[in-house]
Image: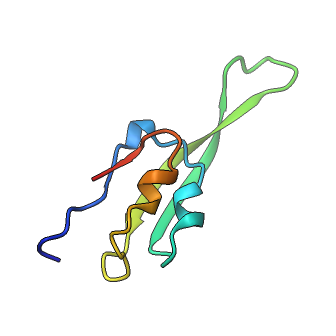
Amino acid sequence: MSGHARIALIADKCTSCMLCVRECPTWCITLDAHQELAGDPGARRPRTVNVLDQFTIDWGLCMYCGICIEVCPFDALAW
């Protein structure tokens, strides 16, 4: 893959929203996450957040189109 920039994950910005996974034209992105309680545990309606466990790109399938970078609303992907 020489000559191609790599797509990098900025993990602390990722909310595991799955937009990059759904919008990838070659389905080369895999994202695993789990939910955790956030905020006051005694709240009447506890809030949950997604927590990233694993993010992988199959470089053999990736077209380096950058769609995943463009659709990420949290700027968690970059060249």
Between 59 and 40, the residue placed more toward the observer is 59
Q: Quadrant of the N terminus?
A: bottom left
Q: Is residue 67 left or right of residue 60?
A: right
* Residue at (54% x, 64% y) in the render: 21
Number of marks drawn: 0
Front residue of this view, candidates 38 and 2: 2
Residue 46 picture quarter: top right
Return the residue nearer the eye: 41 or 25.
25
Left or right: where does residue 69 sit relative to residue 50?
A: left
Left or right, 34 with reference to 60: right
Q: Residue furthest right?
A: 44
- Give the x, y percent position of residue 33: 56, 53
Query: In which quarter of the view is residue 54 placed?
Result: bottom left
User: Is residue 9 placed above or below 49 in the rendered structure?
Assistant: below
What is the x, y in percent for residue 76? 41, 44
Seen from the viewer's position, the closer of residues 17 and 75 is 75
Look at 36% across and 75% down and name the residue there: 62
> Residue at 39% of width from left, 43% of height from top?
11
Q: Residue at x 27, y 53 (%)?
A: 79
Q: Residue 74: x, y in percent? A: 49, 38
> Residue 40, relative to residue 68: is it above or below?
above
Residue farthest to the left, as pictured: 2
In the rendered image, the vertical position of residue 28 relative to residue 39, given as above or below: below
